[in-house]
Amino acid sequence: MRLISGEDLGVQKSLFEGDALGKLSDRYKEVGVGVMLVGDKNYPEELGNIADPPVCLFYKGEPSILKDKCVAVIGSRDQSPRGIRATKRIVPELVKQGFVIVSGLALGTDSQAHRVCLGCGGKTVAVMPVGLDMVYPARHQRLAEEIVDKGGLLLSEYPFGTEIFKFRFLERNRIVSGLSRATLVVEAGKPSGATATANFAIDQGREVWVSRGRRGEKNSEGILNLIEDGARII
């Protein structure tokens, strides 16, 4: 599933070269936001290896954690009690193993994964579908601030003032999986944003892990399909 062609990538990169990038970086630096281009030495290697990496990444926080081993933790916005328990159980174990937790700051599993990670002293990356001049959803403003305060990172491929459209969530999801060595799906309906992210991970040659699903549960439909496709149960 490729969102940006190689030709488009070249055109987009040319927009950020030379003086244009310098002026952009200076403007964003004034408000604490950094800028990196694909191909730069500080650009995350895992993400740079996907078919359609974002040309430009805007970030707030500590970008050096992108050099550590990352795992995506995603799931349903409408969490089940089983999914909540699984996230509370699995995320601390991943942190103990030295993983940085990557997710999308969304309602449900995403925000819980960020919070559990912070609660056990881990580092986490929140990839957003909007520019870093705002937080989406707005109710997670404090969580976003806590992520940065505790050595984590907010990340976006969109400049300030970018409007929210549904397709941007899909674009965001390819970055979540692209940053990560593996994507853990805690629970997922069919179809869902979580299964779309898992499919991105498969296309990107990354591992897909799942929490064990239960037949007959709505939030397990996507999980069971992923297991049939070879996802690893953890």
Image (cartoon, rainbow, N blue to C red):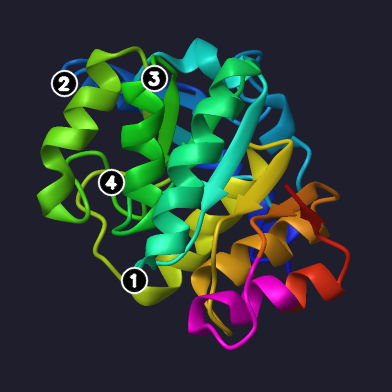
How many angstroms separate mark 2 from mark 4 (CA)? 13 Å
Frontmost of labels 2 and 3 is 3
Q: Type of residue at label 2?
A: Val
Residue to which mark 1 is pinned = 78
Looking at the rendered structure, which numbered label has been put on residue 3? none
Residue positioned 29% across, 59% down in the render: 107
Residue to which mark 4 is pinned = 131
Q: Earlier in the sequence, mark 2 or mark 3?
A: 2
Q: Nearer the viewer, residue 61 or 142?
A: 142
How many angstroms separate mark 3 from mark 1 (CA)? 24 Å
How many angstroms separate mark 4 from mark 1 (CA)? 25 Å
In the rendered structure, which segment of residues is drawn in magenta?
Answer: 213-224
Residue to which mark 2 is pinned = 31
Residue to which mark 3 is pinned = 120
- Give left or right: position of 79 versus 13: left
Frontmost of labels 2 and 1 is 1
Q: Nearer the viewer, residue 233 or 45?
A: 233
Q: Earlier in the sequence, mark 3 or mark 4?
A: 3
